[in-house]
Each structure stands twice: as structure tokens, then as C-alpha cells.
Amino acid sequence: MTADATPVHPEETPAPFPRLDRAAIEALVRAGQRLLVQGGMGIHASDGLAGKVARHRGARLVGVGTISAVLKTPEQLRGEIRRARAEAPGGFVGVNLMAAINKDDFEALARVSIEEKVSFLVQGAGISREIVRWCREGGVPFCGIVSSGRLAAMYEKWGADFVVAEGAEAGGHIGDIGHPLPTLVDEVIAATSLPVIAAGGVDAADVSRFLAAGAAGVQMATRFLACSDGDVHPAFKQMHLAKREDDVVIITSCVKGMKARAVRNAFTERLARGEAVPPRSKLWWFGKDGYRGRRGSCIQCLGEGLCKARASGFKESFCITDALLEAAVHGDTEAGLFYTGQSITRIGERDASDLPRAAEILTDLEQRLADEARPSDAGSQARPAAVGAAA
């Protein structure tokens, strides 16, 4: 791993988070608890949420916070990790990384996460065997995001501690648009003995179904975007309210031309017409030195050959960093890109001033699971979580 991340002196190294490894998950399941994971979301979109979710430890659910490392500087990432540690001492907090980002950035941000001894490191948007090794050497559990049973089995062979099965209903980039989550969860559970977290378009009404199917937990992201906590712009939250099915669109991303789910707005309509949206300066966000010394309008955020806009000389596609920052930081409802899961259409609130806190969402989920379990407690035949069994 490269050595360009901010060094940490031994006397400054903080106490580690508790490890969320396979053994810890299996122990929680045996105790009758399941994981409620807050997904890491976009640039700045989920900042300020991880510690608030990780504080929750209920009779049925254990909250797990996830910090998105994407397009943070090493200093920004370290600060967000330490913020979550202060907000949730003893709670499970992990970091999400995408393998599709610039290789040097990927290594630097992975290094910071491992130095900070986060509870786990979860990686999607591509495959990196190196990061599994880095986590093993650094004593940090690894989780892979998977869109097939085959990939889950591969990660188990490589030494992952658990997997997130992310189905076609997820927000942002989606691997297989024709692979709905219920089918995927069954496929992944059959392919691996690792604990499986169900993710992608999940809301409160879905939780018990996936737990009954054998998942060790569920991941929710869109619901936490629409809560009163977090640093994302208020207009970003409002964009997630009062939406119908036709307010959600599938776009072609600049990242390898992958499909992605977003809220329909003027920006997605421009993309649908085939308009190019070239990059602009980002010094307003990253400071005078730019992103890790890159001061140009294109900060080369993606791996070599993965950005359609850059490959075309910015005559096609769009700058994903600009679009996501416009949404999450400026709250520009016309020029921003608002990635979202399909569960956006089931959010009940209509005004951002009425949104619940993350703690209230978790408390309501606890109560819902208790209410759903009560009539069948005496004779329930729910399938046990698929952990610790033979593949």
C-alpha cells in the first residue's frame, strides 16, 4: 500500500472500534439480534449519520453506521471517523470504499480506515483482492458488496467476514438491473456460509421478510437520507419526499456507462437528451490545493479508463463529482444528481421539517419487529439467519 496518507503517530492512534467480524455477527444472531446497517451514500450525502445509527443497540436490532470514503481527502475521512467514534463509543462503525475510484486514492483511503481501526471496511463498485489482504494484515474485518451468489462465494474463499447482497432496487449504481433483491438474497444465502446483509430499496415494511429469509441483517440508505440528522443540504432531503414511481429514473452513468437510479430532475433530463456536462473547478470544496494536489476541473476521481466523460475529452456524459456535490452540498435541485433507492416512493413524510431523527427511525423499527413477531411467537417457523452453516 502506498504511504501518501496522513501518518498517524502511535501516541495519537485512537482506541479501535469493536470489530464487526463473522464471529461477532454470529454471536449477535444467536442472542436473537440482527444488524440494521446504514448504507454509505455518495459524496457528503451520509456524513454525520454513522455515529447516530451506531449508538442504537436494541433487543432486536443493533445499529451499524457506515461512512462513505468516496472523494474524501484522507484528512476529511479521518475526521468523519473520529466524529462517529465520539458520537457512538463502543458502536459498530465501518467505511465504504468503491474499487472504481482512482487507485492511489483507493489505497490512501483504505490505509486511513485501517489505521483508525474501524469496525469493518466494505467495498463495492468493482473487485479488489488487494483490499481483502490489506484488511487481514491490518486486523480490520472485510465485507464485500455482491450482486450474485458466485461473487459471494469468491469473497468467502478470499477471507471476507460477511457480504452485503445489493439488489436491483438500490440507489446509485446498480450491478444487475434485472436481479431483484428477494431473489438475490436467496441466491447468495445458498452460495455462501457467510452472514448476509440484504440491501437495495429496503424500508421498514421489508425488514422482517428478509430476516425471515435468513439474512443476518438489512441495510437501509434512502430512509436515512430522509431524516432530520446528517450534514446533507435540506433541499437534498426535500428531494426525497412526496415522490411517485415516475419521479425515479434510471440513468447511464459516466462510470463505465453503468446504470444508476436517481430522482428525476432537470439534470437527469439533460442526460436523457444526450447533453454533455463537462467538469468545473472544485476548489470551492477541496480548497486551494484541490483534491490531493489535483487542482484542475477534472480531478481524475475514477480509475484509469473508467470515466466516459474524460475518455471523450468531456464531449460526452458528465462529471459525477460536480453533479453529486451540487446535490449534497449546494442543494441545487436542478443541476444536482440525487441518487436514491426505489424505496423513496414509500417515504411517508411530505416536508423536510417533519423528518424523524435517525434514533427515532431505529426505535420505530424495533417496535415494528416486536409487533410483527408477537402473534406468531409461540409457533413461529421463521428460517434462522444463515450464519455458520456449511455453504
Image (tube, rainbow, N blue to C red):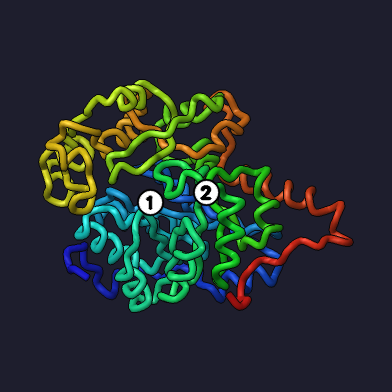
Q: Which residue is mark 1?
A: 68
Q: Is residue 254 left or right of residue 378?
A: left
State the image coordinates of residue 27 (x, y, percent, origin top left): 63, 73
Residue at image point 30% right, 31% down? 326
Q: How many marks?
A: 2
Work out which residue is located at the far front of the displayed protein and give it: 178
Q: Which image quarter is the N terminus in?
A: bottom left
State the image coordinates of residue 194 (x, y, percent, origin top left): 54, 71
Question: Cα distance, mark 2 to mark 1?
Answer: 25 Å
Q: Which residue is mark 2?
A: 179
Is residue 370 shown to the viewer in this render? yes
Q: Quadrant of residue 118?
A: bottom left
State the image coordinates of residue 276 (x, y, percent, origin top left): 22, 28
Tell me: residue 388, above or below residue 144: below
Residue at image point 47% right, 56% down? 147
| Residue in front for this viewpoint, 19 or 243 | 243
Q: Which image quarter is the C terminus in?
A: bottom right
Amino acid type for the residue under numbered disc 1? Ser
Is residue 52 shown to the viewer in this render? no
Label 2 residue SS:
loop
Residue at image point 53% right, 37% down? 342
Tell me: residue 80, above or below residue 108: above
State the image coordinates of residue 317 (x, y, percent, origin top left): 24, 33
Local crowd size for mark 2, using a 10 Å CA cut-off: few (<14), some (14–19), many (≥20):
some
Residues under numbered marks 2 and 1 in contact, where contact means CB atoms less than 8 Å apart: no
